[in-house]
Image (spheres, helix red, strand yellow):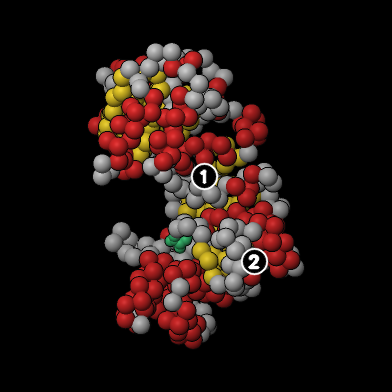
Amino acid sequence: MLKVCKFGGTSMADAKAIKQVADIINADKDRRYVVVSAPGKRFKEDIKVTDLLIKCYNDVLRNGECKETFSVIRDRFIGIVKDLGIDFDINSVLDETEKEIVENSSLDFSASRGEYLMARVFAAYMNVPFVDAKGLIRFDSKGRLNESYTYDKTKMKLEGLEMAVIPGFYGKNSQGNIKTFSRGGSDITGSLIARAMGADIYENWTDVNGFLVCDPRVVANPKVIKFLSYQELRELSYMGASVLHSEAIFPLVKSKIPVNIRNTFDPSQEGTMIVPNDYYANVKPDIITGIAGLKDFTVIYIEKSLMNEEVGFVRKVLSVIEQHGICFENIPSGIDTISIVIASKALENGVLNDVVSEIRESVSPDFIRVIENISLIATVGHGMATKAGVAAKLFNALAKENINIKMIDQGSSELNIIIGVSNTDYEKSIKAIYNEFID
Ligand code: ASP
């Protein structure tokens, strides 16, 4: 059995947390390759090391140096090394890093140093080899991940090692410079290492008990989702649920490697298992798996008799949207109606008016209406496809609370039902759906 583990920023935030991480790794000899994030927040007002490093980059741009901001990072790592009680010359590594940040003046290089420093320190503490991600993860000349190169190189470099500590979040581009993933990207590093090494499981250790059925700011203490399919994860992440980076799943799909979300601060919890879609039948899913949502959408509702017989109608409408460089979220449609759902932000500064008049000109609709301040709420679950009456139950729950549903879209995968409600009904709707389906 081979487990690849990734520990997030709060798990590496201070020596106390880091010692817990070491205990977790030492408790299971299968945990062999460990990816770490930069130290995150220790308390609410604290600043993540990555954010401090980004500030260092901006300081250098402005003043040619970053002494003051870097001293905060310096103190943080010196404190960690001291509290871990290791004999590691952190001062020299920090001096070298500060010099490189000043001389290199690249945002990605600066931002990546939190992971680099943390992995150096943690490898010393665990007394296992440090393997730099710049030798494993490779981006091509267009900045895209070069997967096959990454898998080959990683396998070659790690195969002979019993254990290794690897910094998350970055790799090297085709010019040999450091390039980072988007924020939270250490999750992707972990997935790539898991795939390259053919891991049996990818453990992603964070500071929560797993993926929650819905946002805990909306429903107090929601249940933890025990099993989630890759596909459900995509739907929930897209709609705003964040525990794992939304791109972290892609490297795992082909090899069907499950991800286990675990809590460093409560390792007795089993967490959430994210499994390939076809394993799902074996785990007897609940009717619904999760509820996620986003606020602030605009719906452009278009009506035209015999729209269904007019060749190119939808294309003409969508080309107006396309010409403005806008993405749409959903397009629920009926025989004579179509609604285009767009994030309101994309329609600011007069764009909405332009779009509506151009649609009028282009397809001469009988009626066109704009509905603003809409929230989208996705209720997601494989079980929904096979259970009769799920939609009825959902709509009943909302009706009981007098919530006016302004739009309904059941995706063709039958994996989710998306409803549009007014922003002011957002919290109330999620609570109503949660209470109806989850006991
Ligand atoms: N340290 C990086 C960030 O704060 C990457 C990560 O933690 O995954 O986004």
Residue assigned mark 2: 136
Asked whether the residues under the numbered discs 1 and 2 touch, taking CB atoms below 8 Å apart as contact, a structural biologist would say no
Q: Amino acid at mark 2?
A: Leu
Left or right: 206 in relation to 164: left
Mark 1 neighbour density, 10 Å: few (under 14) some (14–19) many (20 or more): many
Q: Secondary structure at mark 2?
A: loop
Q: Residue at x 66, y 33 (%)?
A: 278
Seen in the picture, residue 85 relative to 363 is either above or below; the reply is below
Residue 161 percent coordinates (x, y): 71, 68
Closer to us: 165 or 255: 255
Q: Say whether residue 293 is visible.
A: no
Q: Residue at x 37, y 62 (%)?
A: 41
- In this rendering, which labeled residue sits more in front, label 1 or label 2? 2
Q: Residue at x 32, y 81 (%)?
A: 63
Query: Gap in Å between the C-alphas at discs 1 and 2?
Result: 29 Å
In the rendered image, the residue lying farthest to the front is 361
Q: Amino acid at mark 1?
A: Gly
Residue assigned mark 1: 271
Closer to us: 306 or 376: 306
